[in-house]
């Protein structure tokens, strides 16, 4: 069994305003294994995105620690790739200049990196669109371009913050499955925050349910699905799907009831 | 089947009809614009000839043409127009430069922008013509004073517009830069600046007009050359033909500037595909 590459220990975080302190996260502890896909779900406004920002290093936790245990024994914090709610491709840049944005910012426009980007553009079917503007791409292609932009920097850990919530429902079903399949091919570790239970079950190896604010880990649910075929939506037709859904639903509604009281 | 054929036949006709109606409208607008102008000129000339109005005070198209030709002949027209154009263009570019610099500084430091906010608001609402006499005392009468007057009219509003534009950039786009390992500088050069091009262009369009206003105010008070000077001089010696000719020239200049900026804006939008 692979070790946890990242281990959160009693992470706490509060928001401060003149009206007082709001405790957002309280004693959050869980580990993430190498190559694992973890989904974090929870009632809206419970602090899922805050937690992701902390893991990404964009915010510093007010209490608790994150332990790093890289597979190769090195001590650096894993390089993080972050995908936001919207693709945020810049209309004033071509698709190609959008996907190399990260390399440009980090002054990493080396031949080797650009070769990798070119390969991804070919693999993801975007090669003939490289000189187009983002608005000329379909929703799915934009997400693929955003993924290339993230992968270009060679992240070890991918964080997705409700990355498909801006898409319409039908597009979202296929695009989320598509993007996660592409990420699985890269064998990277991924944490996805979502409020869509079906999405969490169909994409993740493990679902972590957070409680209402202040968020704590309410339940961890490992997912094992028997897939009938290789199609994008196969996970949603797996026999175990409904059972997992009911379990998650139960925990979450209980949580919402508690919040209302 | 017949229905379908009919529909297919009719579609192009309707399209043609639409295009024709559009063209007709366009021609009508152009025609009425021209008629309005011609009618105005004719009415003005006739009124002056029939002595409905006193052409000493109100001039007339023929007197304006005569005045225009005589000003051309002694070359003073080109001098005055050239000076006003030059001063306006210099003011305009200085305003653009200062606005960009100030708005950038304000964007970089929230504290600075919070400190300066009330001052900017006051300076923006202050009638800048009130400052012109001060400029004359401080800087004397000459091109510098007039350029400063031109800059002062446009600058503060322009800084506020640029800064507002910078602030309106989607904060998530800035977060994206940070997630890609960028810093504040990258957020500015990769997102804020390119994202604010449209608002900078529209502000620029207003600025050229304001710079012209400032330059004319300056020339009224502190010049020996320029169209503003010609207007004041003409009114003082009761050569109202000169005044009206200068005003008409100002109309042309304002129109020319507007068209020039519009063309530049169009070119930039094509280049950036916005």
Image (cartoon, coloured by chain):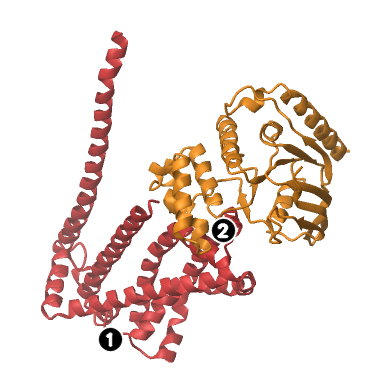
Chain colours: A orange, B red
Q: Residue sitting at 47 percent across and 59 percent down?
A: B196
Q: How many angstroms separate mark 1 from mark 2 (CA)?
A: 54 Å
Residue tagged by mark 1?
Answer: B224
Q: Residue B201 appears in which quarter of the rendering?
A: bottom left
Q: Is residue A233 above or below residue A55?
A: above
The 10 Å Cα crowd at callout 1, few under 14, some 14 to 19, many 20 or more, is some
Q: Position of residue A77 (x, y in %)?
A: 69, 59
* Residue farthest along the top direction in this orientation: B1
Query: The numbered mark 1 sits on a residue in which chain?
Result: B
Q: Position of residue A62 (x, y in %)?
A: 80, 61
Position of B95 with respect to A237 (left or right) is left
Position of A166 with respect to B216 (left or right) is right
Q: Is residue B113 above or below residue B149?
A: above
| Front residue of A255 and A131 | A131
Q: Position of residue A198 (x, y in %)?
A: 69, 31
Q: Residue sitting at 21 percent across and 56 percent down?
A: B40
Query: The numbered mark 2 sits on a residue in which chain?
Result: B
| Residue B60 appears in the figure | yes
Position of A34 with respect to B201 (left or right) is right
> Which of the two labelled residues, at mark 1 and mark 2, occupies the earlier sequence position?
2
Q: Residue sitting at 39 percent across and 69 percent down?
A: B210
SS at badge 1: loop
Residue tagged by mark 2?
Answer: B177
Q: Are marks 1 and 2 on the same chain?
A: yes
Quadrant where the N terminus of chain A is found in the figure: top right
Quadrant where the C terminus of chain A is found in the figure: top right
Q: Residue A209 appears in which quarter of the rendering?
A: top right
């Amino acid at each position: 069994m692979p070790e946890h590459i990242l281990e959160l220990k009693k992470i706490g975080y509060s928001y401060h305003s003149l009206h007082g302190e709001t405790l957002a996260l309280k004693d959050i502890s869980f580990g993430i294994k190498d190559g694992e896909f973890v989904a974090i779900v929870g009632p809206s406004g419970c602090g899922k995105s805050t937690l992701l920002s902390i893991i990404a290093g964009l915010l510093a936790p007010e209490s608790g620690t994150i332990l790093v245990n890289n597979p190769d024994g090195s001590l650096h914090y894993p390089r993080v790739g972050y995908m936001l709610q919207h693709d945020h491709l810049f209309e004033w840049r071509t698709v190609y200049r959008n996907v190399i944005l990260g390399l440009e910012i980090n002054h990493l426009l080396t031949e080797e990196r650009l070769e990798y980007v070119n390969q991804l553009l070919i693999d993801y079917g975007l090669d003939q669109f490289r000189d187009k503007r983002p608005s000329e791409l379909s929703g799915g292609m934009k997400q693929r371009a955003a993924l290339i932009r993230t992968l270009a920097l060679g992240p070890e850990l991918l964080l997705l913050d409700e990355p498909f919530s801006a898409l319409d429902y039908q597009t979202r079903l296929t695009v989320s499955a598509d993007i996660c399949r592409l990420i699985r091919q890269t064998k990277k570790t991924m944490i996805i925050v979502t409020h869509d239970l079906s999405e969490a079950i169909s994409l993740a190896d493990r679902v972590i349910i957070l409680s209402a604010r202040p968020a704590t880990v309410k339940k961890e649910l490992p997912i094992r699905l028997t897939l009938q075929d290789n199609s994008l939506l196969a996970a949603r037709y797996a026999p175990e799907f409904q059972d997992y859904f009911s379990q998650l639903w139960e925990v979450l509604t209980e949580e919402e009831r508690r919040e209302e009281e | 089947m017949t229905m379908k054929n009919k529909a297919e036949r009719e579609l192009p006709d309707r399209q043609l009809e639409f295009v024709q109606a559009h063209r007709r409208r366009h021609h009508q607008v152009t025609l009425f614009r021209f008629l309005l102008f011609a009618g105005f000129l004719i009415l003005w000339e006739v009124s002056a000839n029939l002595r409905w109005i006193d052409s000493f005070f109100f001039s007339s198209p023929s007197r304006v043409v005569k005045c225009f030709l005589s000003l051309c002949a002694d070359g003073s027209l080109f001098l005055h127009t050239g000076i006003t154009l030059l001063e306006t263009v210099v003011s305009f570019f200085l305003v653009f430069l200062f606005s960009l610099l100030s708005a950038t500084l304000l964007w970089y430091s929230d504290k600075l922008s919070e400190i300066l906010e009330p001052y900017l608001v006051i300076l923006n609402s202050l009638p800048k013509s009130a400052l012109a006499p001060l400029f004359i005392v401080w800087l004397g009468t000459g091109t510098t004073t007039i350029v400063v007057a031109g800059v002062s009219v446009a600058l503060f509003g322009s800084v506020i517009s640029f800064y507002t534009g910078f602030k309106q950039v989607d904060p998530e786009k800035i977060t994206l830069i940070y997630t890609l390992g960028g810093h504040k500088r990258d957020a500015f050069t990769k997102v804020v600046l390119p994202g604010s091009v449209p608002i900078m262009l529209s502000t620029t369009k207003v600025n050229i007009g304001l710079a012209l206003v400032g330059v004319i105010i300056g020339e009224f008070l502190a010049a020996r050359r320029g169209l503003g000077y010609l207007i004041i001089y003409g009114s003082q010696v009761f050569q109202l033909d000169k005044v009206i000719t200068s005003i008409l020239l100002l109309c042309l200049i304002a129109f020319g500037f507007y068209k020039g900026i519009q063309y530049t804006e169009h070119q930039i939008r094509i280049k950036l595909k916005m």
